[in-house]
Image: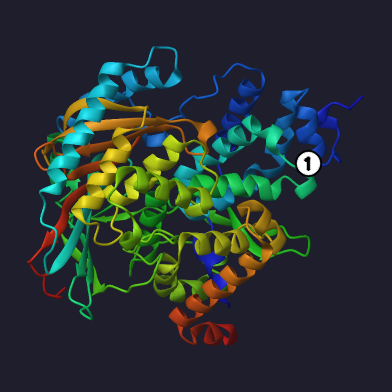
């Protein structure tokens, strides 16, 4: 078996359900008939379809997020006049974050970037389902001393029940160390590609639904030396050279646009604003290597100049940290997935706290640590 | 006068796109032709649930941009649609990373096929999975695009070039580089499995 065949075998998923295909076709026809405005938000995925106000992923965060999303969506459609006050507020927050960022240490033995990702899932059994939130932490340690290897760690922090009722259901099930996502594994949910036929199409082989198994206790998933090279995990995307990026706002803006326009984002994203938001996201909230404080500050100032970034006000993240939420609503016509992209910044330090799309209702991504440190990576031990 | 789209099986993609400028509903025929392909590709890259949303989104974007479809670059809409879908993947790098991380985990839960479907190929691929997925994570996004367009989309060099808007020569070099890295990551096990 060659590697391409193996990739096909490993990654192929069941075909879309008939109703999924049909509902997409209906949307297309509505759009064709002029019945759908050009910048609608795509429907929420299956398990986000419940009433948003009842969604309890993290205390405090969601009501604010949901309200913020609604407000921003209105502005994004252009039906309401752009709120200059929330736009001006966003600019003030970003400029303040840039100033605070400049005060962060500009050197250390390591540059550390730690993120936490979480996702809400229904687990247990069909008869006794309950909800948990998975939590996975990634740590990237970039060694500053030449020749010294960095380290990448990935930890499953163990899922936790969403509410006290969910916790009671988990205990009633015997407090299992591992829980299983609720789904019917006997169900044939579609087909996957088999051999390629001479006409280029693929044979279809039935495939059964698969359910995730989720750890309820912490597990160290991996710990390995960091491997360098552009595009590798934890490294900048191809074409984005951190050392060459300028700390000057106008120059950085030009450099980022040059990068996005030469295919840095792997596709034609339309509009400076969409491109700069995506590019700044790399510099501010993604593990791509040591981003010096002056460069992160410049990225904030680039965002401050965007006309369509709005302030959503103060929010509390999944870890209970308070921050200022900023949002940009992207439109399908930009070549990006439409929806609300949110960046939460700690006002006191300017460090990024959270980055999420579509309000972070069902999944979230937090930045737990970001910056230079003289601490060392935890010892390698399972 | 064109026939109603639903009855005209042999209309080329380019003709369909062109006629949809006058009869927008006709674009649905392109959806019917390629929805499964696009869903299959997106599901492989981002997971089935995300693909459920984004496959339809691909066609909505294509519809809005149908005036940009250039038949001079090829009369088939397939590469064009894969290009739009790939662009959507690039906007969901985190979902992609999450999926790669999950699939790359040793002992990760994977599809439990009934024994009748448990093909030798599947078993062989399973053995390679952690190393292969780790190596895929290490590829540059542009290299992963080429690999997946080839492996899951079944696109040739020319079509991939058209999808990504890059020269075919670049596709070739990216694919060769990527394959070499994947092979290195797997050591000599691809050959062993071939014999199994």
**In the displayed structure, would residue A281 be above or below residue A25?**
below
**Tag 1's secondary structure?**
helix
Question: What residue do we see at 89% from left, 27% from top?
Answer: B2
Residue located 79% across and 40% down the image: B14
Instruction: State which quadrant residue A163 falls in.
Output: top left
> Label 1: few (<14), some or many (≥20) within 10 Å?
some
Depth check: give the residue in front, A75 or A42.
Answer: A75
Residue A57 in sight in this render: no
Q: Position of residue A253 (x, y in %)?
A: 38, 44
**Chain letter of disc 1 in the image:** B
Question: In this image, B175 relative to A165: left or right?
Answer: right
B115 or B170, which lies in front?
A: B170
Above or below: residue A53 compared with residue A361 = above
Report the side of B106 relative to A220 (left or right).
right
| Residue matched to label 1 | B13
Q: Quadrant of the C terminus of chain A?
A: bottom left
């Amino acid at each position: 078996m060659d590697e391409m065949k193996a990739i096909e075998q490993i990654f192929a998923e069941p075909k879309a359900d008939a109703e999924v295909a049909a509902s997409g076709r209906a949307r297309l026809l509505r759009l064709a008939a002029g019945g759908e405005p050009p910048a609608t938000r795509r429907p929420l995925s299956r398990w986000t379809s419940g009433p948003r106000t009842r969604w309890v992923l993290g205390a405090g965060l969601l009501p604010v997020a949901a309200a913020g999303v609604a407000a921003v969506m209105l502005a994004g459609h252009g039906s309401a006049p752009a709120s200059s006050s929330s736009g001006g507020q966003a600019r003030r927050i970003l400029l303040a974050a840039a100033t605070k960022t400049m005060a962060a240490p500009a050197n250390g033995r390591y540059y550390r970037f730690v993120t936490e990702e979480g996702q809400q899932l229904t687990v247990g059994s069909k008869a006794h389902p309950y909800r948990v939130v998975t939590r996975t932490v990634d740590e990237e340690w970039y060694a500053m001393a030449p020749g010294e290897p960095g380290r990448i760690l990935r930890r499953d922090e163990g899922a936790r029940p969403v509410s006290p009722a969910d916790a009671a259901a988990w205990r009633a099930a015997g407090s299992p160390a591992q829980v299983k996502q609720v789904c019917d594994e006997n169900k044939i949910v579609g087909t996957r590609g088999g051999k390629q036929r001479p006409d280029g199409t693929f044979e279809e082989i039935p495939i059964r639904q698969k359910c995730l198994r989720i750890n309820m206790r912490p597990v160290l998933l991996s710990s390995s030396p960091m491997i360098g090279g552009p595009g590798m995990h934890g490294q900048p995307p191809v074409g984005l050279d951190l050392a060459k990026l300028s700390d000057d706002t106008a120059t950085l803006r030009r450099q980022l646009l040059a990068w996005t326009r030469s295919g840095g984002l792997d596709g034609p994203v339309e509009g400076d604003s969409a491109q700069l938001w995506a590019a700044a996201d790399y510099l501010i909230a993604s593990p791509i290597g040591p981003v010096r404080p002056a460069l992160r500050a410049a990225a904030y100032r680039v965002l401050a100049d965007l006309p369509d970034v709005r302030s959503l006000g103060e929010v509390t993240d999944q870890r209970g940290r308070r921050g200022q939420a900023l949002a940009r609503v992207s439109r399908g016509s930009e070549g990006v997935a439409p929806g609300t992209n949110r960046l939460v910044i700690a006002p006191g330090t300017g460090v990024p706290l959270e980055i999420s799309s579509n309000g972070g209702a069902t999944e979230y991504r937090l930045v737990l640590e970001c910056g230079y440190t003289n601490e060392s990576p935890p010892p390698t031990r399972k | 006068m064109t026939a109603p789209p639903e009855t005209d099986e042999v209309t080329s993609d380019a003709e369909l796109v062109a006629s949809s400028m006058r009869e927008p509903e006709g674009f649905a025929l392109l959806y019917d032709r390629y929805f499964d392909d696009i869903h299959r590709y997106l599901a492989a890259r981002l997971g089935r649930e995300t693909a459920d949303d984004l496959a339809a989104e691909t066609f909505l974007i294509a519809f809005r941009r149908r005036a940009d479809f250039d038949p001079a670059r090829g009369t088939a809409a397939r590469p064009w649609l894969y290009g739009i879908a790939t662009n959507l993947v690039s906007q969901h790098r985190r979902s992609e990373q999450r999926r790669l991380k999950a699939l790359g985990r040793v002992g990760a839960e994977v599809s439990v096929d009934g024994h009748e479907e448990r093909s030798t190929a599947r078993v062989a691929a399973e053995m390679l999975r952690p190393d292969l997925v780790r190596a895929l994570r290490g590829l540059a996004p542009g290299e992963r695009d080429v690999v997946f367009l080839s492996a899951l989309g079944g696109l040739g060099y020319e079509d991939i070039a058209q999808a990504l808007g890059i020269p075919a020569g670049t596709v070739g070099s990216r694919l060769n580089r990527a394959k070499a890295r994947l092979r290195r990551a797997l050591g000599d096990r691809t050959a062993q499995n071939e014999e199994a």
